[in-house]
Image: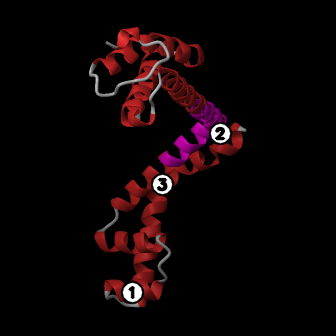
Amino acid sequence: MQENLTDGQIDWNDRATMQYLFRRFYLPLRSFAYQHVKDDSITDDFVQNAFLNLWERRMNFNAVLAVKSFLYLNVRNACLNYLKREQVRVCHEGHVIRMLTEEDCADIALEEEVNRLVYDAVAALPEQSRRVVLLTMEGVPNPEIAERLNISMNTVKTLKMRAYRMLRERLKGIQWILLLPFFMK
């Protein structure tokens, strides 16, 4: 039985070998990982992965001392990689928080509200006028709008003029909203 092993040879054909190694090293490895990571579930994952890696590479090891070194290095590297990722995550999280100050959030919310009001007003236009305005908002020039909608240039201009008049009427109440960011600073 492997219980009598100290630093001797390992017989991987003996089914009790892995059980022995697990019982001998699981708790010390877990304690080692916890000193660095301070999270039980993460340390459990690291130790279990170390044993899985050992199992996959078991034929490379013939002594308990080599197995012990492998397991500790595996857990140490997992802890270091985790801590590096956490450091990057915290750094980026702080950067995002600094970017999204209350002012920024208010500006974004205001912009979204204005966009919603404009698109609601455009959606309420008659179909042909709405299509002309949406194509104009996409940056399509009048000749191409006329071609796409199979209408004359004069009709495009007339539809735009009427649509803009309707939009000005529907959106006249939000003009003060557009100036709000200038007064809030």
Kindly check if marks 3 and 1 are in contact, taking CB atoms under 8 A apart as contact.
no
49 is higher (above) or lower (below) than 159: above
Quarter of the N terminus within the rendering: top left
84 is higher (above) or lower (below) than 177: above
Q: Position of residue 184 (x, y in %)?
A: 69, 37
Instruction: Please name the residue that numbered disc 1 is placed on.
Output: 146
Quarter of the C terminus within the rendering: top right
Q: Which residues are magenta?
A: 84-112
The residue at 41%/83% (across/down) is 145
167 is higher (above) or lower (below) than 59: below
Residue placed furthest toward the front: 9
Is residue 97 magenta-colored?
A: yes
Position of 121 with respect to 68 (left or right) is left
The residue at 40%/24% (across/down) is 10
Residue placed furthest toward the left: 15
Q: Which one is closest to the eye, mark 1 or mark 2?
A: 2
The image's colouring method is: secondary structure
Q: Position of residue 141 (x, y in %)?
A: 49, 82
Camera-nearest residue between 74 and 141: 74
Q: Position of residue 78 (x, y in %)?
A: 53, 30
Q: CA distance from mark 1 to mark 2?
A: 43 Å
* Circle on res. 171: 3
Q: Which one is closest to the eye, mark 3 or mark 1?
A: 1
Residue type indicated by callout 2: Met
Residue type indicated by callout 3: Leu
Secondary structure beneath dot 2 equals helix
Camera-nearest residue between 138 and 41: 41
